[in-house]
Image: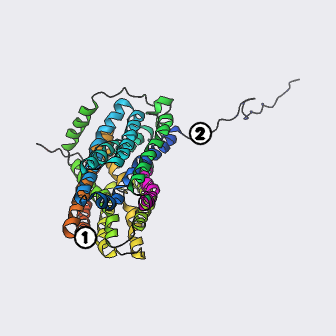
Amino acid sequence: MTQTTEPAARDHSPPTGRRAPRRRVHRAWIVAAVTFVTIIGGAAFNALPGLLIDPLHAEFDWSRGEIGLAVSVDMALYGLTAPFAAALMDRFGIRRVVVVALSAVAAGALASVWMTAAWQLMIYWGLLVGLGTGAMAMSFSATVTHRWFVARRGLVTGILTAAGASGQLVFLPLCAWIVDRHGWRPASVTVALAALAVVPFVWLLMRDHPADVGLAPYGGAYVDKPAPARGAASRTVRVLFDAARTGPFWLLAGSFAICGASTNGLIRTHFVPSAHDHHMPITAAASLLAVIGVFDIIGTVFSGWLTDRFDARRLLAVYYALRGVSLLFLPVLMAPSVHPPMVFFIVFYGLDWVATVPPTLALCREQYGDDSAIVFGWVLASHQVGAALVAFLGGVARDHFGSYDVVWYAAGALCAMAALMALMIRRAGVPVAVIVK
């Protein structure tokens, strides 16, 4: 007699004594979070210059042009350091470079407490802080994004770009209150302590490459960590020379210079003293800049999301055009108190503040591949040179004309130029035109 047996049922339960593995947060997001906090700590100093123009002018009788020159040195070095910082991170690692940079920012901010001459302002604010913040500039976030992410690069770029605005949001009202109640020196000490507080997070949680912890980048395949790149400075210069032979580089650099002129150089440096000229309290003007920081976060993250889905050139053109129009209305909005039209300007400008970064970085990646972080560093250098020129010239214009009106109108016209330049950048897949010299 033959006995038939039913096939045994398959056991889908996990083996005895073992639990089904949990999905952990990918280490890339932890590195991105540390980068976000680091940029906030480094950006704390950027909240100060606009708040200190009037106090330094009153205490030392330095002209606004002299103070603006020191700020412009800071901004120029910030930009010129950025491309070398990207190469140094390739050579020595992200952690080491960022820790040294945070220490330089803290040293410059602390040393400024004892300054008595304008040249010292240029050394402490311009040289030390400029070099330190430059090493943590947008090329830092570009390097982290390029190494740790394949998917969601546009979104992460937007989030990390918004970190600077978050620092502004946190430190502007605080520093304004400190300056108003206790003077500018305690505000400078606060910034130094903020930079030092970030150092342990960087040293303990930051990693230079996914391969350091045996992981693939988020959304990509595992790749071995490349050997440290020697000759960082020469590579940085070589990448510049190669990129400078292409038309897209000059269009990106020129438009981003105007971006810097109309944000860091103009609004961040001169909005508070301009509002104060119209008898607005310094704390109210600083609070408006902080509101820009709130909407900057929203606008930049949303811009990163848009960059993953739409033509980056068209996005840039829209951003610059809208920014230019808004600046033309600003002179008639200045008043002794905050009113609805000014709030509308602040919200609108905040959404557009650095929304330009994700599409600009995307275009650098599209055009220059593995060298994109260094190329973006040079494009960022142009951003800061534009900011430096307007930080200085804006102060000179105020000394000469007695108001900032001409500066607002000129910046609006420049933004219209930047919109046209963005549309002239070649599309992906079109051969790069090489400039023959």
Q: Nearer the viewer, mark 2 or mark 1?
A: 1
Q: Which residues are magenta?
A: 159-181
Name the residue type under label 2: Arg
**Going by the image, does 126 lie left or right of 145?**
left
For the residues labelled 2 and 1, the Cα–Cα distance comes to 56 Å
Name the residue type under label 1: Ser
Quarter of the image where the N terminus is located: top right
Where disc 1 sits, the SS reads loop
Neighbor class of circle 2 (other Cα within 10 Å; few <14, some 14-19, many 20+) is few
Q: Residue 308's x, y, as percent?
A: 41, 52
Quarter of the image where the C terminus is located: top left
**Residue 89 belongs to magenta span:** no
Q: Is residue 67 above or below residue 39?
A: below
Q: Is residue 113 above or below residue 181?
A: above
Q: Residue at x 25, y 58 (%)?
A: 62
Q: Residue at x 57, y 41 (%)?
A: 25
Q: Nearer the viewer, residue 109 or 9?
A: 109
Q: Earlier in the sequence, mark 2 or mark 1?
A: 2
Where disc 2 sits, the SS reads loop
Q: Nearer the viewer, residue 418 or 422?
A: 418
Q: Nearer the viewer, residue 381 or 284?
A: 284
**Residue 176 belongs to magenta span:** yes
The secondary structure that dominates the magenta segment is helix
Residue picked out by circle 2: 24
Q: Nearer the viewer, residue 125 or 363?
A: 125
Residue picked out by circle 1: 403
Scheme by which the image is coloured: rainbow
Q: Residue 162's x, y, as percent?
A: 43, 53
